[in-house]
Amino acid sequence: MIPLDEYLKQARFLIVDDEPLNVLLLEQNLEMDGQLNFCSTTDSRQALRLFREFQPDIVLLDLMMPFLDGFAVLEQLRGEIAPDENLPIVILTADISLETRQRALAAGARDFITKPLDDCELRLRIRNLLETRFLHLGLHRQNQSLDALVKERTRELEESQRQAIQQERLHAFSEMAGGVVHDFNNVLMLVYCYTELLRGMSLEKEPVEAQEYLGIIFTATQDAMQIVERLRHFYRPRHVDDLFLPTDLQQLTMQVVQLSKPRWKEQARANGREIDVKLDVPKVALALCNPSEVREVMLNLIFNAVDAMVGGGVLTLRVGAGEGAVFFEVGDTGIGMTEEVRQRCLEPFFSTKGEKGTGLGLAMVAGIIRRHEGKLEISSEAGKGTVFRVSLPECHHPAQEQAAIANGPAIRPLRILLAEDKEELSKVMALQLTTDGHFVEQVRDGAEALGKLRSAPYDLLLTDLSMPRMNGAALAAAAREMDLQLPIIMLTGFGAMLLQDGETPAGVNLLIGKPITHQKLSAAIARVAA
């Protein structure tokens, strides 16, 4: 007699046979060497209920029974057994015909034991079937553990990647911040230097020079307003709202020469360098571009050229036209670039200046030119200098372009409620709006604005986002709850970076980033109130 092993000892047996004596003999035969776990019935109608309650590891099933025969029971159990469960059903039958075997196997039986039963064969077959089942269950548990381990490792890997990405973003943000400081310092230096000159001048005796310096300061301030905006525009496509104007590159170049003069002249001399400027800037066709952005490109290229001429040299500015485009060139006699550096110099954060460089200047230059659908060509040789040529689309209908911009949309005088907690900002915006013919009432926070909206009619609500007591988003939502249909424009110092998915707060018609020019503010109001 083969001794019972662990597979038999841990198994649960369900026996379904209409003959009580057969059930007793089966249990006694299998229990000869130990106590096993049996559940038996002589009523085949109870088989399904017992199967669900007992959850057996093996089923011993007679074929020929009243009420439900073995084939009917097989059909019931087949719907209860998962495809990957590998639960054996053994048929006990005296009918060993081929037809019976095929039918039982098709119904889900795993093996046959012929009556009258041979004790040794019975035990061997059952042990082998249970061994296969428990090995399968063990493998299934291992797979589950492996799946759980893979999920855990995947989660850990994703978390590590998330942290790495976060660190990279923080590093990029740090680099971005350095670029902002760099660009703002350039503009602030211009503003400071020319303001200092103005303070030492007699405005009555030198009105022409004073007006020239004020113009430079105004232009530099306009450029500063766009620096933060430029940081999010490395390679974005041209937007429908971008303001592209017919621009005289000759005039723009002369402006930039004056704007950059403190850098290439006074500062260079202070460092013991002498830089000569050569101009070849004839009158050419107008370019269709954003003047402020192109001015930023020129300034970046000039500042790079000045940095490259460590011992002094010649800075050359050229303007020309041809083949439906206009171009300007910025050349220097500085240290030049190797071919490898030339190939990589437009990459964000790539710099050969060590800690002194952010690697953002030329990347922004490339982004601006691409947005203008222009072309950037770089000629350089180590030790002999570099020439940057920027080609821009020619403006084919300058008169029409200028007329459309100058005229702008006509709009009636409006009654505007202005909610802004910064007193000086509120004051200057109110002056701008009053200049346009609008009536403006100023409040300092959202709660005060809401009270005004409840007591008087307005044509437009112009609100800051960040305010005490009630912010602009809550104010807009409250206004819509009152069923007010007036247009709402929201201003925010966070700019378009506030909602990266392009959304605006509920109830707001237009979200605009600060700072905003008089022209853009007027255009925004015309856009929502026309």
Image: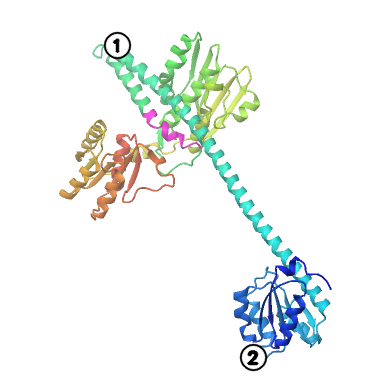
Front one among 515 and 302: 515
Residue at 29% in and 35% down:
518
Residue at 42% in and 33% down:
228
Residue highlighted by disc 2: 67
Q: Does 33 sit left or right of 462 as displayed? A: right
Q: Does 6 sit left or right of 422 as displayed? A: right
Q: Which residues are magenta?
A: 222-234
Quick check: can you spot residue 525?
yes
Numbered tag placed on residue 200 in the rendering: 1
Q: Position of residue 213 (x, y in %)?
A: 33, 18
| Above-or-below relation of 353 to 495 | above
Q: Position of residue 375 (x, y in %)?
A: 54, 34
Q: Quadrant of the N terminus?
A: bottom right
Nearer-N-terminus badge (1/2): 2
Q: Position of residue 480 (x, y in %)?
A: 27, 53
Q: Are marks 1 and 2 in contact (CB under 8 Å)?
A: no
Amino acid at circle 2: Phe
Give the alpha-carbon distance from disc 1 to disc 2, as whole Å. 116 Å
Q: Position of residue 141 (x, y in %)?
A: 67, 60
Quick check: can you spot residue 289?
no
Q: How many marks?
A: 2
Label 2 SS: loop
Q: Residues within 10 Å of mark 1 (few under 14, many from 20)?
A: few
Residue at 63% in and 17% down:
383
Decide whether residue 227 is among the magenta residues.
yes
